[in-house]
Image: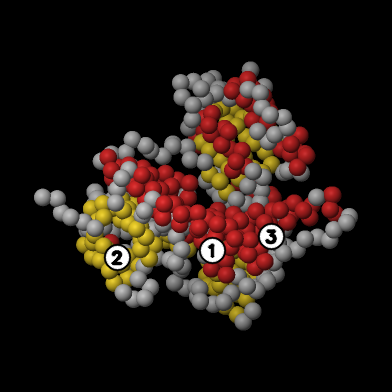
Amino acid sequence: MKKSFDYDAIVIGSGPGGEGAAMGLVKQGAHIAVVERYHNIGGGCTHWGTIPSKALRHAVSRIIEFNLNPLYSDHTRLLRSSFSDILKHTENVIQQQTNMRQGFYERNHCALFQGDARFIDAHTLELTTHDGSVELLTAEKFVIACGSRPYHPDNIDFTHPRVYDSDSILGLKHEPNHVIIYGAGVIGCEYASIFRGLGVKVDLINTRDRLLAFLDQEMSDSLSYHFWNNGVVIRHNEEFEKVEGTDDGVIMHLKSGKKMKADCLLFANGRTGNTDTLSLENAGLEADSRGLIKVNNMYQTQQPHIFAVGDVIGYPSLASAAYDQGRIAAQAIIKGAATAHLVEDIPTGIYTIPEISSIGKTEQQLTAMKVPYEVGRAQFKHLARAQIVGMNVGSLKILFHRETKEILGIHCFGERAAEIIHIGQAIMEQKNGGNTIEYFVNTTFNYPTMAEAYRVAALNGLNRLF
């Protein structure tokens, strides 16, 4: 006889992965509950990560655009805004996002529980609510979508008022003239753009030998040059020895013997899965040293009835992928197997100023694989639309096979790169010979548009063949 549970499934966490799973389950008729630790749903993506940082970036890039526009230069003094002023804009966006997502759960009759969850056994959660009361919830299946948080080394005092991580930086109240950003990954580079755009001096400490080494090297070099040209000081191959908090700032000591002082430190070097309070061992699960859970291609853990999606399973740690992972896990729970799967080439969107976006292989990967490829390039400064709107910085690069003309990779640097990439992605996904660079030559695009960069790059590449 089948055991009776409170719910068919319980989803732990209401970020992108949890929402994807919850909506996928409820649309297929499952009786589900969602447990969220915080007062508002949406997870780290909505409240501390993707949404606020991109809203910040947008506001700063518009200020830069205004200040550089010759229309305003003679008649208007430069726009200046503080970090905390711009944060007010992000609060409005976060509220809109939260209200919209709350509506999804209410319309679909999902039970929402607020509190801290931990496993009592493989089918039972203990929920401790904010008033201290405890409730037990049982389910046949579970989806762990509890996300991640910034990594905190033991030897840095994050309680110091001038030491921040990528979550707490959103509470910045003072006006720094100089900031040290430790960690030059995606988050570190995005905040370097934001602070420099506000006129703050930035020291960007990179523990590796180049910025964003997973990118095509030209894209990485373009970002490095753009940072250098805007006055960001990048220090490669450095590690911190200790961080000393002072009354009015921080002093960072590096292992190389260097030391530097600034008004504050943003530590943005790595993230940790939020699994430490889940008592996974009671459900027969364990996380690795960074709090991550291993899963198979259907997002099942070593316990077949427990699934995990989003940041808590590691790569690619993208909000876009987490929604799809949740949806795929929901399908596997209801149908016993998932027919859907993540696309092979997931686009990378990096919201620096300017943006970077890429999909597919890099030149370095294709060279190592000994694939005979060719390159087609378009500089934004040659496009009419870019000239009209003053988006002259940037380029689009298409990598394609010399013989088959198949598109192998697309790399874009410049404003709106994360949107522009999707046009190429759509063609790359075509099967049965539909993926070819010649599509862009044989198709008429609106003029003037940024999409025209594809036609220019395609012609440029095909002209290299002989």
For the view shown, which residue lies furthest in the top direction? 466
**Number of marks in picture:** 3
Q: Amino acid at mark 3?
A: Arg
Q: Residue 409 versus residue 103: which sits nearer the camera? A: 103
Quarter occupied by residue 136: bottom left
Residue 457 position, x and y percent, is 66, 29
In-image side of 84 versus 359 (left or right): right
Label 2 vs label 3, nearer the camera: 2
Residue ID for mark 3: 196
In this rendering, would 182 be left or right of 16? right
Marks 2 and 3 sit apart, C-alpha to C-alpha, by 42 Å
Which numbered marker is on residue 118?
A: 2
Q: Is residue 43 above or below residue 399?
A: below
Q: Which residue is mark 1?
A: 166
Find out whether the residues at labels 3 and 1 contact each other: C-beta distance under 8 Å. Answer: no
Q: Residue at x 49, y 20 (%)?
A: 433
